[in-house]
Image (cartoon, helix red, strand yellow):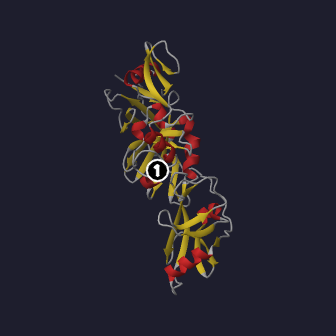
């Protein structure tokens, strides 16, 4: 196989979606659960990201982080630092972070107006 | 036995987490070199690709008419991952066959679902020993589906004889819910068969027998 060089084969210019200024909301239940998780320590942030994969093509990724090397927009929502990766801002603008309290399938839930469909478990969307 | 020229594209992927990225978007377990199927949300085939590990990089070999769709499918889901995609199709020819022929000089050899696959620099003067008719007769004899015949964007992998490339328990990927439901209910709609000529629903016509995608009874 000839793998090429920079002269003979340069990387494809892939289309990157435009970054949008993300607006997101958080329900009272989600805020309360985050209060329990963070306590008084607000040095950490909630990272709300998107990964490729899942049944519908994209998966939500929620993490509590101190910092990240991923270029992010930083928001202040209900007193919490929320980080949204710039590369997935177009998929997350307008979302609502909710918390569903039930034994099976409970936990944080994202209501996303950009999603045309989602899989049964609610973690994946398109 | 022999080998035929495959109308293929070759993409070179470089970056971190390549197997993980490809695994999340295709039907087979991608943890090493293998053949896998990229499917859409309705489980229809986008392309069947060879994943070939080359040191820390991965070569992705698929059917040339599907290249733009695959590049779009992958690039839409990079989401800031440090992965670059380079099109090296113009530098390489791809051959596929039974593995009995002499290996072309400096070829990258890969065990594909369809046979032995060789990626050879275009500077090589290698010529294939088979024409398409010979390859098709071989496929019919061994019930091997192929691009442009059985494998099209109108079918899902279970309907065209690619069930071996749909991993039963690897976890989520695009189209997984539909394929899993078909399997668990034993209803996949269509299946690939070899039938004596003359017959209906032919996808590859052979001299005495043909490959057909037929509706499940």
Q: Nearer the viewer, residue B16 or B42?
A: B42
- Measured as percent of width and height from the top left, residue B215 is found at 51, 27
Q: Quadrant of the N terminus of chain B?
A: top left
Mark 1 lies on a secondary structure that is helix
Answer whether residue A74 is visible to the viewer in this image.
yes
Residue pictured at 51% horizontal, 37% vertical = B156
Q: Badge 1 local density, few (<14 within 10 Å), some, or many (20+)?
A: many
- Measured as percent of width and height from the top left, residue B114 is found at 40, 32
Q: Which chain contains the residue that carries disc 1?
A: B
State how many labels appear: 1
> Which quadrant would residue A95 be assigned to in this image?
bottom right
Q: Nearer the viewer, residue B85 or B44?
A: B44
The residue that label 1 is drawn on is B22
- Measured as percent of width and height from the top left, residue B74 is found at 54, 50
> Which quadrant would residue B126 be assigned to in this image?
top left
Answer whether residue B122 is visible to the viewer in this image.
no
Q: Nearer the viewer, residue A32 or A74?
A: A32
Residue pictured at 40% horizontal, 50% vertical = B170
């Amino acid at each position: 196989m000839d793998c090429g060089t920079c002269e003979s084969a340069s990387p494809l210019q892939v289309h990157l979606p435009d970054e949008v200024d993300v607006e997101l909301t958080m329900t009272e239940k989600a805020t309360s659960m985050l209060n329990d998780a963070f306590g008084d320590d607000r040095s950490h942030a909630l990272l709300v990201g998107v990964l490729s994969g899942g049944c519908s093509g994209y998966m939500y990724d929620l993490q509590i982080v101190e910092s990240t090397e991923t270029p992010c927009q930083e928001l202040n929502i209900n007193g919490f630092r929320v980080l949204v990766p710039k590369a997935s801002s177009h998929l997350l603008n307008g979302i609502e972070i909710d918390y569903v309290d039930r034994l099976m399938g409970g936990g944080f839930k994202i209501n996303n107006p950009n999603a045309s469909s989602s899989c049964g478990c609610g973690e994946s969307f398109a | 036995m022999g080998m035929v020229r495959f109308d293929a594209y070759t993409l070179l992927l470089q970056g971190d987490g390549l197997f993980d990225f490809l695994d999340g978007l295709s039907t087979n377990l991608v943890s090493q070199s293998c053949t896998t199927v990229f499917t859409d949300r309705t489980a229809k085939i986008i392309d069947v690709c060879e994943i070939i590990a080359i040191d820390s990089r991965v070569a992705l070999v698929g059917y040339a008419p599907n290249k733009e769709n695959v590049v779009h499918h992958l690039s839409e889901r990079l989401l800031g991952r440090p992965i670059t995609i380079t099109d090296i199709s113009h530098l390489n020819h791809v051959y596929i066959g039974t593995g009995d022929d002499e290996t072309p000089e400096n070829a990258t050899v890969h065990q594909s679902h369809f046979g032995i696959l060789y990626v050879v620099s275009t500077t090589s003067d290698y010529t294939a020993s088979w024409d398409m008719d010979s390859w098709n007769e071989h496929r019919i004899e061994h019930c091997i589906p192929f691009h442009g015949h059985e494998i099209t964007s109108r079918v899902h992998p279970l309907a065209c004889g690619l069930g071996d490339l749909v991993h039963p328990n690897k976890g989520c990927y695009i189209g997984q819910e539909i394929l899993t439901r078909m399997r668990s209910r034993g209803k996949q709609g269509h299946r690939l068969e070899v039938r004596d000529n003359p017959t209906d629903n032919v996808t590859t016509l052979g001299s005495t027998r043909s490959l057909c995608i037929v509706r499940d009874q």
